[in-house]
Amino acid sequence: MQLAAISTISRCNTIKSLDNCIIQRDNPYWTVAFDDVVTAMGREIVLLKEKKDLEAKFQVERENIKRLDLVIKNKNDYIAILEKEYKDLEDKLAKAVELLKIGKEEFAPHTTNSDVDLFIKENKKGE
């Protein structure tokens, strides 16, 4: 019966089951080996709780990593879009500058910026 008590307590790996299975020293089935198993089961219960807590933390961190991966992936896509828009704007600006140069040469080849500034100043005086 002492071995049966030890066998029973060795299967108790929750606090509730351990509390239900513990027998006191005055019980004829209690032995030092029984008490050693109770101590070992107590350590197992603590370790199982720590393991469960660590697994939960691991899941949270795994989800955080997934979110960060998504942010990084989307960031790279967003940067690619911005780079394309920047290149398009550069191209449009270059075309606009070229058209301005052509227009200036065709319609006012002798006009300079200082001529335009002088024209504006003279017209403002007359107002």
Image (cartoon, rainbow, N blue to C red):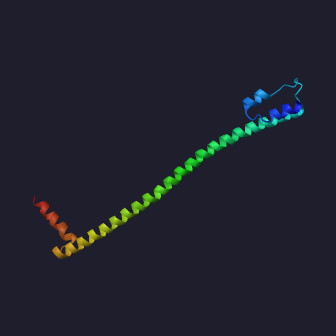
Between 46 and 122, the residue placed more toward the observer is 46
Q: Position of residue 14 (x, y in %)?
A: 73, 33
The image quadrant of residue 53 is: top right
Q: Quadrant of the N terminus?
A: top right
**Corner quadrant of residue 46:** top right
On the image, the x and y values in percent for residue 30 come to: 87, 28
> Residue sitting at 70 percent across and 38 percent down?
49
Most foreground residue, 119 or 70: 70
Give the residue drawn at x 76%, y 28%.
19
The residue positioned farthest toward the top in the image shown: 26
Residue nearer the viewer, 119 or 65:
65
Location of residue 120 in the rendering, given as x and y in whole percent from the top left corner: 16, 64
The answer to whether residue 38 of the structure is visible from this angle is: no
Image quadrant where residue 105 sits:
bottom left
Specify whether 75 is left or right of 10. left
Q: Is residue 84 above or below residue 39?
A: below
Residue drawn where x is 28% and y is 70% of the image: 95
